[in-house]
Amino acid sequence: MALRLWASSTANALRISVASSTAHLSPSYSLSRCFSTVVDGLKYASSHEWVKHEGPVATIGITDHAQDHLGEVVFVDLPEPEGAVSQGKSFGAVESVKATSDINSPISGEIVEVNTKLSETPGLINKSPYEEGWMIKVKPSNPSELQSLLGPKEYTKFCEEEESH
């Protein structure tokens, strides 16, 4: 037990994430130079939100880097479905034990779904920011806005430069 606690605190101090999507598979370890997980296939905003565009819908959430800097998320304020979001504008807020931060939409569009699980379990953002911790799903009104966002390599570099200042 003491060894597991030490290993857990050491991994946390080094910001090493251990993710296991299914119990029968061995965990996959991810450690990037900015010590946060950056997922291929997503687009990233410099305000630390991510977008996964699949067909007519784009899923939006905050990045692993953002949740790591916020600390333990204790409350999430999200909009109602069928509202609209605009690129670069706030659509909600995340409250952690450290701070409250606005969540900005990386793209414009109509909200088609809100992750209601987050009102009951806001810690999903810490546990699984790219899967269970997604925030809203949007039908993009201007899909070309995705081109203005950062790819995984650019976002990693952005985080590294931000950390060095």
Image (spheres, helix red, strand yellow):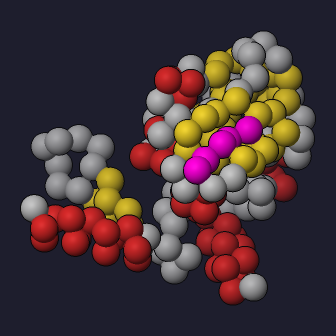
Work out whether residue 70 or residue 24 is closer to the camera in this orientation and state it.
70
Give x and y (percent) for residue 50. Answer: 66, 49
> Residue 119 appears in which quarter of the rendering?
top right
Percent of width and height locating residue 30: 38, 67
- Dominant SS of magenta comes to strand
| Nearer-the-camera pick, 12 or 134 | 12
Residue furthest bottom as drawn: 164
Outermost residue toward the top?
Answer: 82
In the image: residue 148, left or right of residue 165: right
The residue positioned 52% from the left and 35% from the top of the image is 122
Q: Is residue 29 visible?
A: yes
Q: Which percent across, then down, holds residue 49? A: 69, 50
For the N terminus, give its image quadrant.
bottom left
Query: Which region shows up in magenta?
Result: 93-97
Please state, as top left, top right, bottom left or bottom right, where the C terminus lies in the image.
bottom right
What residue is rendered at 55% in x and 44% in y? 73
